[in-house]
Amino acid sequence: MSSNSSGGRLEGFMTGKGFYIVLFLCAAVIGLSAWMMAAGNGAMEELAPAGAGFEEKRVETVIITPAPREERVETAALPSVTLEEPAEAVQPVWNEAEETEGVFFVWPVEGEPERLHDVQSLHYDVTLRDWRTHNGVDILAPLGQTVVAARGGVVQSVENDGLYGTVVTVDHGDGSTACYANLADLPAVGAGDRVETGDVIGAVGTTALCEIGQATHLHFAMAVDGMSVDPLDYLPGE
């Protein structure tokens, strides 16, 4: 009895105003669910990073090369160096034919050279009839012609040589000497005499037995520090 009564009331409620109430509640539930879903999607969009889910962006790496750094190299100032000029070589006065500080050479006798100076090679000697060197220059001159000092100095020696006859040697005082050979028997000077350039030494003779086969001449020889040199390198040119 009781169950029939309850079932009847429920059926009456559903067919009456109750049906509309249930329908309203269902619509409200559906609307609330839709609103909550829409609100949830918006929140998720706000939390999601921009562009998420879309095409992947390309990230390029840019390498910046620093400009080359100009390095300054501090150079220590070099000390100034003063080079001393080498001392000027002193040329011996006998090495110049022209006048130098009042000292110069002159020809000891006027004439032409016949036999030249040569100590490096052999030449035929017409007197001795052999081959030999020659330590001086033979200047052609007539017998008895005056012979003068080619340069001033002190008479070192006057001697009668077995080969070159009467020989006068003058020391110029700077390591050079001049030898006048084949002079006449009696020269005009003696050992120790001081002679100036152009002073008379003697005269051309025929006392040099080793050169007697030649025409009359003065045998004139020079040496520097004991070494034979060519007199024509010191006598003035024509």
Image (cartoon, rainbow, N blue to C red):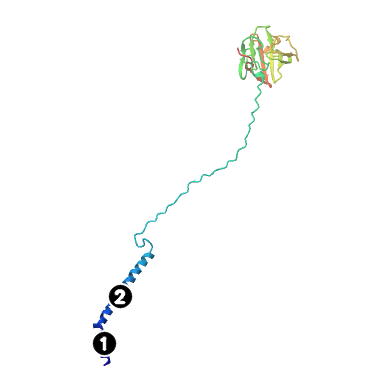
Residue plotted at (25% across, 80% down): 19
Where does label 2 land, which residue?
Answer: 28
| Numbered circle sitting on residue 87 | none
Quarter of the image where the C terminus is located:
top right
**As rendered, which of 142 and 68 lies closer to the eye?**
68
Task: Check whether the beta carbons of the residues at disc 1 and disc 2 lie within 8 A of each other.
Answer: no
Q: Residue at x 64, y 11 (%)?
A: 139
Specify the amino acid type for callout 1: Arg
Q: Nearer the viewer, residue 136 or 11?
A: 11
In terms of depth relative to the viewer, which is nearer, 81 or 86? 81
Q: Is residue 25 above or below residue 166?
A: below
In this rendering, position of residue 69 left or right of residue 47: right
Q: Residue at x 25, y 81 (%)?
A: 17
Query: Neighbour class for label 2 at 10 Å: few (<14), some, many (≥20)?
Result: few
Q: Is 43 rendered above or below residue 228? A: below
Q: Quick one: quadrant of the N terminus? A: bottom left
Tell me the quarter of the picture where residue 85 sits: top right
Amino acid at dot 2: Ala
Which disc, if any, is residue 9? Answer: 1
